[in-house]
Amino acid sequence: KSPGKNLSFSEWLRLLPFLGVLALLGYLAVRPFLPKKKQQKDSLINLKIQKENPKVVNEINIEDLCLTKAYCRCWRSKTFPVCDGSHNKHNELTGDNVGPLILKKKEV
């Protein structure tokens, strides 16, 4: 009888944890050499605004606010960071429900 042949069911069950650890170690050893997933273009939120910058940051002085101002959150506005209503078309096309951030100055 050669080793490894005709193992009983209980012997295979006892080998399972060992084989699982071997498989995990093999995967961890090979993983650095596997091709990395590239971020797909359609998963990007910001498609064209200030792409030359590592991070888009806009600063608004609250003293300059008029009574009400709407700011874009869909990244589609042609007047970014101010909302131009582009989210409406985006929502129709994608089924999304994004809308602007509306800042209101309290009237005194």
Image (tube, rainbow, N blue to C red):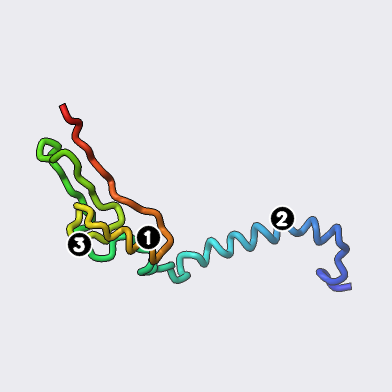
- Number of other residues with Cα within 10 Å of mark 1, as a class: few under 14, some 14 to 19, many 20 or more: some
Tag 2's secondary structure? Answer: helix
Q: Quadrant of residue 6?
A: bottom right
Residue 2 position, x and y percent, is 85, 73
Pick whichever, 80 or 58, lies toward us: 80
The residue at the far left in this view is 64
Residue 100 in the image: state x and y as whole percent.
29, 49
Residue at x 25% of width, y 52% of height: 72
Identify the secondary structure beneath mark 1. helix
Up-down: is 30 above or below 80?
A: below
Residue type, label 1 = Asn
Total marks shown come to 3
Checking the image for residue 78, the label placed there is 3
Q: Residues within 10 Å of mark 2 (few under 14, many from 20)?
A: few
Q: Label 1: which residue? A: 91
* Residue 54 rendering spot, x and y as whole percentages: 22, 57
Q: Is residue 100 above or below residue 53?
A: above
CB within 8 Å, label 1 to label 2: no
Give me the C-alpha separation between circle 3 and circle 1: 16 Å
Q: CA distance from mark 1 to mark 2?
A: 49 Å
Which quadrant holds the C terminus?
top left
**Viewer-proximal residue among 13 and 57:** 57
In the rendered image, the quadrant that contains the N terminus is bottom right
Quick check: 34 left or right of 85?
right
Q: Could you say which is closer to the camera, residue 81 or residue 31?
A: 81
Up/down of 60 relative to 81, above or below: above
Q: Name which of mark 3 and mark 2 comes first in the sequence.
A: 2
